[in-house]
Image (tube, rainbow, N blue to C red):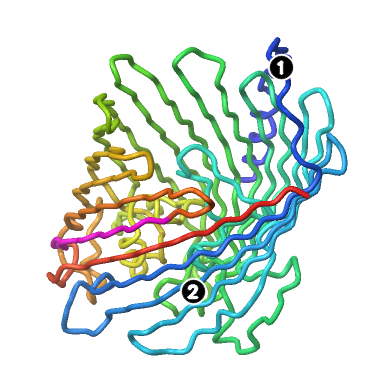
Amino acid sequence: MKALPLALIALVSGVVVAPTQTSAQPAPPDPPKAEIGFEERVRSEDWGNLTDFSSTNDDFRTQYRFRSRLWMTLRPSARVEVVAGIINENRRIAEPSMAFHGREVVFETLYVDWRLGSGWAVRAGRQNLMRGEGFVLFDGNPLDGSRTAYFNALDLYRSFGKSRLELLAISNPRTDRYLPRFNEARKVSELQRLVEWDERALGAYLTYAELPKTGLEAYAFYKTETGDFRAATHPLFQPDRQLGVVGGRVVRTLGKGFTLVGEAAYEVGSQDAQPGSSGASRDLRAWGGYLRFRKELGGKAGPSVSLAYIGLSGDDPATDTIEGWDPLFSRWPKWSELYIYSLGSETGASYWSNIGMWEAELRLTPAKWLAVRAAYYRMQAFESLGARGGVFGSGTHRGDLFQIRGDVTLGGGWRGHAVYEHLDPGNFYAGRDAAHYLRFEVIYTLKHAL
């Protein structure tokens, strides 16, 4: 694994960067020198049975979430942009009735973007990072839900034509310690964990858009996960881990309304021995990917249908090698709002791994202000967890998941959505009672140029 950072540097050094292309198109208008923004998000959520799939245990929840964001953008020159933003989320859990410390205010963004010239620029500080469909890079803080998704990162990038090469350095500690927190909780039990361990990474990400009807992405990362806050006796405790991942994504327009999207990645690494044991360290070898065909059907409502397969390798308990996919920085509800909670009993909340599933999807826009999505997932596991007992059964069929979502854009800064999910569990689980998840959301956004 010591060779991985050197290999990463060699990979980046070997990328040939094309000269910046000029265009005869008129330059876009200059953005305002300063801008201030405010956003309020209100959510109502209701769910049940999604952790154990049993009505015997009372795990139903109804809660209300109130997230407030305030930010400011300054552009003192054509080369420099400074962005600072704070955020707060309060929750009222009505069923079961319980107290929740949600008064903490934190920095969601605080970065400087400096254009260096000749296509080069650097963005340093707290920032959001999403690349592709968020398969490996999307959320730096999976344990605080949708409150934040930021990364503490340095992004040195080179733009050429429609493409970009990025060199990334990331440091995401398990609790926020780089910037001030206001009205922070004092009790250890109330501290907001961001992730179970300290995460650091070096990476390169290439987005290439110079080919007709084809978009390409390639990436390589070296990551460490150290200092799990849980006791070594905890059933989900993870010893320190180091891994490298290489992967790529392609989007190809095939004609006649057909589009092909695919992504695949492979991981190599190692994990330290369990503390206090006489065991040895373990190698890590894992894979993940998806393939999707989409067909635009035409017509006023702009309907489209798609069929996809998603595969994330599982760990075979009969071997010493760790074969379970490590989701890197992609622990978010990419495929399901409901199922991120169900995954909590396996490795951790929203820890997508050991999954093979078919996805069938329908999208349409019946009105300019309304977009609808319906989806079905046939969910399997590559490895059974029946030996653990508890909520797990002896099989590999995770279940059948149904989703319906409507997004509304009303203008004037108002938008919202409603989403409902229903899961009929399979023999991967001991319980056989269906789970549900229901959410309503309203967002108001206000921006003002100064």
What amino acid is found at the position of numbered circle 2 in the picture? Answer: Ser
Q: In x, y percent, where is residue 170?
A: 67, 51
The residue depicted at 56 percent of the width and 34 percent of the height is 219
The residue pinned by badge 1 equals 26
Taking the image as shown, residue 237 lies to the left or right of residue 445, namely left
Residue 34 vertical position relative to residue 50 in the rendered view, above or below: above
Residue that lies at the very extreme toward the top in this rendered image: 24
Of residues 367 and 10, which is closer to you in this image? 367
Q: In x, y percent, where is residue 394?
A: 15, 64
> Are the two marked residues, 2 and 1, in contact with CB atoms closer than 8 angstroms?
no
Report the magenta stretch's main SS: strand
The residue depicted at 57 percent of the width and 23 percent of the height is 208
Of labels 2 and 1, earlier in sequence is: 1
- Structural crowding at the residue carrying mark 1, measured as other residues with C-alpha within 10 Å and reported as few (<14), some (14–19) or many (≥20): few
Residue 449 vertical position relative to residue 204 in the rendered view, above or below: below
What amino acid is found at the position of numbered circle 1 in the picture? Answer: Pro
Of residues 390 and 350, which is closer to you in this image? 350
Residue that lies at the very extreme toward the front in this rendered image: 412
User: Does the stretch in magenta take in 203?
Assistant: no
The residue depicted at 74 percent of the width and 66 percent of the height is 178
The residue pinned by badge 2 equals 277
- Of helix, strand and loop, which one carries label 2? loop
Count of numbered badges drawn on the protein: 2
Image quadrant in which you'd find residue 105: bottom right
User: Does the stretch in magenta take in 426?
Assistant: yes
- Structural crowding at the residue carrying mark 2, measured as other residues with C-alpha within 10 Å and reported as few (<14), some (14–19) or many (≥20): few
Q: In x, y percent, where is residue 352?
A: 38, 55
Q: Which residues are magenta?
A: 416-427
Q: CA distance from mark 2 to mark 1?
A: 67 Å
The residue depicted at 50 percent of the width and 84 percent of the height is 100
